[in-house]
Image (tube, rainbow, N blue to C red):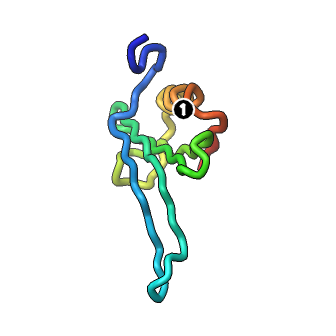
Amino acid sequence: MNEGEGDPILPVQIDHAIEEIWNDGRLEQYYNFLDYHFECDGAYCRARSYADDFREVVLFGPFERRTSIKKVSRPDFEGDVYCYLERRFLKVTRA
């Protein structure tokens, strides 16, 4: 089976990042995560999964574009993204 076979959509980019929050030289919070970026006909969704539980993912959007927080109604696109995530994660939640 080829990568993406059976998926209605694929992410256009996947980022692995670490965010650290320091206070007075002490590490207070540490986040290790993957962000999945999806785009289709001008709409954008992002999904994030934290390394402490890669069985779960949170879906954000759809937005009118990557740099916007303005939500748009794109049920087909959102459904395709949800389908992709459901195939890979045990739990998909909405932000």
Residue tagged 1? 85
Classify 25 as above or below 51.
below
Q: Could you tell me residue 54's position as x and y percent?
A: 57, 43
What residue is drawn where x is 50% and y is 47%?
A: 48
Taking depth in this image into account, of 75 and 38 the one nearest to the observer is: 38
Q: How many marks?
A: 1
Q: Quadrant of the image for the N terminus? A: top left
Q: Could you tell me residue 95's position as x and y percent?
A: 59, 50
What residue is drawn where x is 45% and y is 52%?
A: 70
Classify 92 as above or below 22.
above
Neighbourhood count class around disc 1 (C-alpha, 10 Å): few under 14, some 14–19, many 20 upward? many
The quarter holding residue 68 reads bottom left
Q: Could you tell me residue 39's position as x and y percent?
A: 36, 36
Secondary structure beneath label 1: helix
Residue furthest to the top in view is 1
Type of amino acid at the residue the image marks with label 1: Leu
- In the image, taking residue 68 as reference, residue 89 lies left or right, namely right
Q: Could you tell me residue 34's position as x and y percent?
A: 45, 47
- In the image, taking residue 1 as reference, residue 85 lies left or right, namely right
Classify 13 as above or below 21.
above
What residue is drawn where x is 61% and y is 45%?
A: 94
What residue is drawn where x is 49% and y is 82%?
A: 26
Residue furthest to the bottom in view is 24
Taking depth in this image into account, of 33 and 11 the one nearest to the observer is: 33
- In the image, taking residue 53 as reference, residue 21 lies left or right, namely left
Taking depth in this image into account, of 51 and 75 the one nearest to the observer is: 51
